[in-house]
Structure formats: structure tokens, C-alpha cells
């Protein structure tokens, strides 16, 4: 793939691979394979591959719930893995959302990996001249080829898939810019130099690290500051010498490679907007992989007798058979009289659904409103877990009626 990198008024046309990964300055493939002592979020980076690990295409970063970011040019596979043992299926029916004109897109998993949400760095005045941690899942150095650098350079040739591991390293963001970095993509970017004087953990992006994460610690929290997209390889293949091996060159001044990243602080709002809002009915259906007929209000994908609309309204999972979410009835005593009451629990701040309590003494004749309900807009009880409980009571005491019924009618709002 041809990559055009415009930087400081200089246009450089380079022959580049379609994905990148991590090599350390010291060339130690066995180093930095576990969470760094700094606490950088090592577990949040995954490998894009097929079930079982074959056909690796790149890296991806967990953002929140079932949603991941990867480079737009990374070809998607059926699964991702965070640990090389467990493989999580990608939701193939979810159309990846490209973030503007960047080389970055949002993808979705069928099941959540259960990881903490990743904070996005939003301060574009604080993301340069700072030390960051790069976490990517790719090849290391070719152990059969010694360092070919001399003097002020150190050049490690990239290894094969046998060196494929998740690694971390550090680097300082040198500067920011804006323009066409990868072909067909125009965006704000950050870049790092591969400095030979920065220590043994100095990190270089290489094969299968496109879509990996660059993290910055701010006020005690690690935040995603960049998404890996491209490199310059000053000693690698060119149009004139396409057979040169890919490598990472650590040096000084102009004798060193650069790594490029989408500048997250420019796109935090766009990323957040792309993630479906599960507080809305439409976002909830997407989050639960309900498409076409499965997304109909009356559909029942888990065969528990509860429709999709009611699953949403009562905080259920349409893919897990359970009737425990349904409202419950009870008799309550108040000032010496007994009343019939219905209680429901729901997620807080749902949008797109209305709740209408109704009562009747004849199952064949339900009213069109809440006539006969003592309070059709009770104050919810906050359960402290993101849900709230409401109770609706008949205004007539049980002793005054031979029979009575209560229900809550659920309707989708336009």
C-alpha cells in the first residue's frame, strides 16, 4: 500500500505495509509482555484475527462495553483476542463506523469482554512533548538478523509471525499535525520519533500494530491519546528498492523512523457519538445485536415470552431467557384498608418508551388511561445500581370490589 505522509512542508511517498506492531530499542522479544509497573492498560488491547488466532490483521483498542477502535485500513476478521486464549466474536451485522475522514473506525463485539471503559484524552494542549506508553499486538525483531545499525543508528529487522506477541514500550510524542497520513485519510495526528537515546523501552510500531493504543497518564488515570496508523521506514522498502526488508531504525535527528497516530483529542465527541446509546431503544437493540426481524417490538429471541420492547422497558437481556424482570403484584395495607399494587423495576433514564398503569374489574375492558390508579406518576425509588423501582396502586380498596386487575402498558414513543 502506498502511504503519503505530509509533514513540515515535505511530502514523502513511501511503500508501507497495511499494518504495524511493536519492537523495543533493546531488541528483546521476551521483554514487556505483561502489564507494565506504571499500570498502563495492557489488557485493553486486542488482536484482530479469526477464531483460534489465525489470519491476524492488526490490533484494536477496547473503548467501552462491546465497542472497539481499530485503524480503518485494518481488514476485519471474525474474532478478536485479548489474551491469545479466549476469542470473542465480532458482530458481523454491525457496520463499522468510520470516524470522520480519519484512518480509524468503530467495531462491535457480540459479547462484552467485561473490561473497564477506556477514557479518551480530550486536552489537545497537553498531548505533545509527553511520555506515553504504546501497547500493540504484533511481531518482534527477526532473531536471526543482528542489529545492522552503526554509529548513531540501531536497526532491527522485523520478524515473522512466530514473534507475534502483545508488547508495550514507551515513547515521547514529538509533535502534532494535520493532513493526509495514510492514503485516502485526512486527519489530525500525533507522531513519535524512534530515539536511540531514550532507553531500552523505546517503542517502534511494526507489523500488525495498526489499531493499537498509545496511552498517556493524566491525573492518575490512563487515557487513550492516539491510535496507531502508519510509520516512516527510512531504511525499509521504497519504490526504488521494494525488496528491502521492513525494519525499525532508532537514531538521532534525521536518521530515525517516525510513528503516526490519530490524535484522539480531536475526535472524542465523534467517537462517543458513534457508540450506540443503550438508554435509547434503537441503541439498545444495536447493542444486543438485534437486526431485521429480531428487532421487531414483538420479537422474542430468547423465547421467554417477553417481547423485545418489554425486555428494554424492564431492563432485560433479549438473548437470555429470564422472566424475573417482569412486574410483580402484591397486597398492601394502608390506614386499615388493603389495596392491590403492581411494582416494576427499570433502568434509569430510558428514552423512547412510556409506562401507563391501568386497572380494570373486567379483563375484557381495559381503560385507555390510568383511571382508577391512586398515583400514575409516583416518585421512583433509586436502587443505587442504575435501576429504579415504581409502585402503582389501585385507588379502590380490595374490600370494595369482587375482583380487580392491574397492569402496566408499555408503548414505544416516536
Image: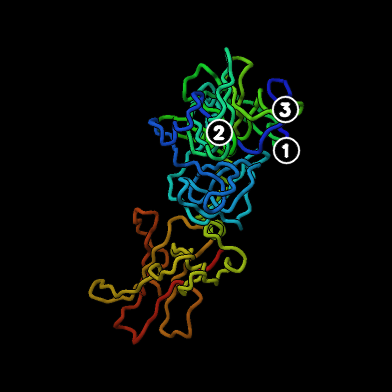
Q: CA distance from mark 1 to mark 3?
A: 20 Å
Residue 251 location (% of width, % of height): 58, 17
Residue 266 visible, this orientation = no
Proximity of marks 3 and 2: CB atoms separated by less than 8 Å = no
Q: Residue, x 60% and y 56% (percent of image)?
A: 92
- Furthest-top residue in this view: 151
Disc nearer the start of the sequence (3/2): 2
Considering depth in this image, is 295 or 224 the residue closer to the camera?
224
Q: Which residue is mark 1?
A: 184
Q: Residues within 10 Å of mark 2 (few under 14, many from 20)?
A: many
Q: Identify the residue at image location x=52%, y=37%.
A: 163
Label 3 to label 2: alpha-carbon separation: 26 Å
Q: Residue furthest right?
A: 240
What is the spatial separation of the Cα atoms under label 1 and label 2, in whole angstroms? 19 Å
Q: Is residue 207 above or below residue 50?
A: above
Q: Which residue is mark 3?
A: 238
Label 1 crowd bin: few (<14), some (14–19), many (20+), radius 10 Å: few
In this rendering, the label closer to the viewer, 3 or 2: 3
The foreground one among 403 and 146 is 146
**Left or right: 73 as drawn, with respect to 167:** right
- Could you classify mark 3 by the number of other residues whose Cα lies within 10 Å: few (under 14), some (14-19), or many (20 or more)? some
> On the image, numbered disc 2 is attached to which residue?
226
Q: Earlier in the sequence, mark 1 or mark 3?
A: 1
Q: Is residue 309 above or below residue 231?
A: below
The quadrant holding residue 400 is: bottom left
Above or below for 352 versus 138: below
State the SS at label 3.
loop
Amino acid at each position: 500500500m502506498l502511504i503519503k505522509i505530509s509533514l513540515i512542508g515535505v511530502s514523502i511517498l513511501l511503500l508501507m505495509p497495511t499494518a504495524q506492531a511493536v519492537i523495543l530499542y533493546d531488541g528483546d522479544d521476551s521483554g514487556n509482555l505483561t502489564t507494565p509497573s506504571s499500570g498502563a492498560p495492557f489488557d485493553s488491547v486486542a488482536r484482530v484475527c479469526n477464531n483460534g488466532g489465525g489470519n491476524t490483521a492488526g490490533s484494536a483498542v477496547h473503548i467501552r462495553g462491546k465497542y472497539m477502535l481499530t485503524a480503518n485500513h485494518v481488514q476485519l476478521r471474525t474474532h478478536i483476542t485479548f489474551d491469545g486464549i479466549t476469542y470473542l466474536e465480532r458482530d458481523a451485522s454491525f457496520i463499522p463506523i468510520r470516524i470522520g475522514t480519519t484512518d480509524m473506525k468503530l467495531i462491535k463485539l457480540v459479547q462484552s469482554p467485561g473490561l473497564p471503559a477506556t477514557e479518551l484524552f480530550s486536552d489537545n494542549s497537553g498531548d505533545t512533548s509527553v511520555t506515553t506508553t504504546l501497547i500493540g499486538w504484533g511481531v518482534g525483531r527477526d532473531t536471526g538478523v543482528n542489529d545492522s545499525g552503526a554509529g548513531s543508528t540501531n536497526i532491527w529487522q522485523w520478524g515473522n509471525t512466530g514473534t507475534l506477541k502483545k508488547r508495550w514500550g514507551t515513547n515521547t510524542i514529538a509533535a502534532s499535525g494535520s493532513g493526509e497520513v495514510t492514503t485516502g485519510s485526512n486527519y489530525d495526528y500525533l507522531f513519535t520519533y524512534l530515539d536511540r537515546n531514550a532507553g531500552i523501552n523505546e517503542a517502534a510500531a511494526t507489523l500488525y500494530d495498526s489499531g493499537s493504543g498509545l496511552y498517556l497518564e493524566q491525573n492518575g488515570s490512563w487515557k487513550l491519546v492516539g491510535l496507531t496508523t502508519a510509520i516512516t521506514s527510512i531504511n525499509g522498502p521504497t519504490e526504488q528498492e521494494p525488496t528491502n526488508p521492513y525494519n525499525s531504525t532508532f537514531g538521532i535527528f534525521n536518521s530515525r523512523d517516525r510513528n503516526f497516530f490519530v490524535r484522539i483529542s480531536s475526535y472524542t465527541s465523534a467517537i462517543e457519538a458513534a457508540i450506540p446509546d443503550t438508554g435509547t431503544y434503537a441503541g439498545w437493540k444495536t447493542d444486543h445485536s438485534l437486526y431485521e426481524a429480531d428487532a421487531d417490538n414483538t420479537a422474542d429471541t430468547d423465547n421467554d415470552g417477553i417481547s423485545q420492547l418489554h425486555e428494554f422497558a424492564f431492563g432485560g437481556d433479549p438473548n437470555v431467557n429470564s422472566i424475573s424482570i417482569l412486574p410483580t403484584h402484591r397486597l398492601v395495607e394502608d390506614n386499615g384498608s388493603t389495596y392491590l399494587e403492581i411494582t416494576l423495576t427499570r433502568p434509569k433514564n430510558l428514552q423512547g418508551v412510556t409506562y401507563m398503569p391501568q386497572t380494570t374489574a373486567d379483563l375484557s375492558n381495559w381503560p385507555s388511561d390510568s383511571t382508577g390508579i391512586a398515583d400514575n406518576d409516583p416518585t421512583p425509588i433509586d436502587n443505587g445500581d442504575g435501576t429504579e423501582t415504581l409502585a402503582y396502586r389501585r385507588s379502590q380498596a380490595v374490600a370494595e370490589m369482587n375482583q380487580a386487575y392491574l397492569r402496566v402498558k408499555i408503548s414505544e414513543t416516536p
